[in-house]
């Protein structure tokens, strides 16, 4: 009889991600990896998030794009440490890029690190960055079928943020169907609906963030 033996061989990315996770864990730094299609509203949500924090908040952001420092410039206005990772063509961040850009920050000074991944619903889902949780954003202009077409990232994320709900009256987007599709791929997936334009739903997002961060802290 043949017994199939499967063992995951750690590739270089997984090894660096595991080291990063250990360092984050050791310093009690809660790390989130935000993933979505280009333009779904990652930076806009981060602008709202940073604006909602007190000045002394120990938070930092890494933001990835193929080109430009635009997102880092938008986010730097809030006074917290922000760095742009320019991938130069790569469609996702990897653990090495994150490690390199963290080199001159002290993790012990941070209790929250948010990584905005490159806008792409496919590539980033395969790269562990050492984060505590992946978060997928889906906007109301993208179509309700996206969780079914791009299941991997919806399956791997702990939270789906349905963005741009202020546009619901103007777009043929069925929010209930989108949520149903996401939960077909990932039963029990947590979902928050919000608009970074009007601010509706932001409280639920901030509450999720704080609860998950505190849960990590108490386990530390
Ligand atoms: N109506 C509406 N527009 C939004 C909302 N959130 C973001 N936008 C707009 O959507 C566009 C893209 O938003 P970004 O926050 O730059 O999206 P992103 O996901 O960071 O984009 P990339 O980093 O390029 O992948 C901008 O024009 C935003 O003003 C929202 O809640 N409602
Ligand atoms: Mg962005």
Image (tube, grey):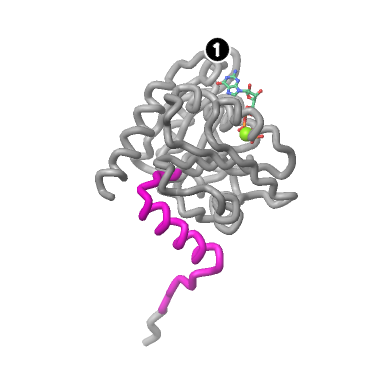
Q: Which residues are magenta?
A: 5-31
Q: Quadrant of ligand 2?
A: top right
Total number of numbered labels? 1
In the displayed structure, 106 sits above or below 96; it is: above
Disc 1 beta carbon < 8 A from ligand 1? Answer: no
Q: Secondary structure at mark 1?
A: loop
Residue 147 in sight from this viewpoint: no
Q: Position of residue 99 (x, y in %)?
A: 55, 55
Inspect this view and state whether residue 21 appears: yes
Residue shown at 45% from the left, 62% from the top: 19
Q: Look at the image and tell me in which quarter the N terminus lies.
A: bottom left
Residue 59 or 165: which is nearer the viewer?
Answer: 59
In the foreground, 97 or 60? 60
Looking at the image, is 111 positioned above or below residue 3? above
Count residues near mark 1 (Cα–Cα under 10 Å), then give few for <14, some for 14-19, many for 20+: few
Q: Position of residue 83 (x, y in %)?
A: 61, 41
Residue 106, percent across and down? 48, 49
Q: Quadrant of residue 75?
A: top right
Give the residue displayed 52% in from the left and 26% down from the top. Answer: 163
Q: Position of residue 96 (x, y in %)?
A: 58, 58
- Is residue 94 left or right of 215 when viewed as pictured? right
Residue receiving disc 1: 169
Q: Residue at x 51, y 49 (%)?
A: 152
Q: Residue at x 71, y 44 (%)?
A: 66
């Amino acid at each position: 009889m043949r017994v199939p033996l499967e063992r995951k061989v750690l590739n270089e990315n997984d090894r660096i991600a595991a080291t990063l996770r250990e360092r984050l864990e050791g310093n009690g730094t809660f790390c989130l990896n935000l993933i979505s299609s280009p333009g779904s509203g990652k930076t806009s949500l981060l602008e709202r998030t940073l604006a909602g924090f007190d000045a002394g908040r120990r938070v930092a952001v890494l933001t990835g794009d193929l080109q430009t420092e635009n997102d880092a410039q938008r986010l730097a206005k809030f006074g917290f440490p922000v760095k742009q990772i320019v991938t130069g063509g790569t469609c996702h961040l990897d653990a090495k890029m994150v490690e390199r850009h963290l080199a001159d920050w002290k993790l012990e000074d941070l209790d929250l690190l948010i990584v905005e991944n490159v806008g792409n619903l496919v590539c980033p889902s395969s790269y562990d960055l050492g984060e505590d949780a992946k978060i997928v954003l889906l906007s109301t202009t993208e179509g309700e079928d996206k969780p079914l077409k791009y299941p991997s990232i919806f399956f791997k994320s702990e939270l789906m943020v349905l963005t741009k709900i202020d546009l619901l009256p103007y777009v043929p987007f069925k929010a209930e169907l989108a949520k149903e599709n996401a939960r077909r791929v990932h039963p029990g997936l947590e979902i928050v609906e919000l608009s970074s334009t009007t601010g509706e739903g932001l409280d639920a997002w901030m509450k999720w963030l704080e609860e998950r961060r505190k849960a990590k802290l108490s386990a530390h």
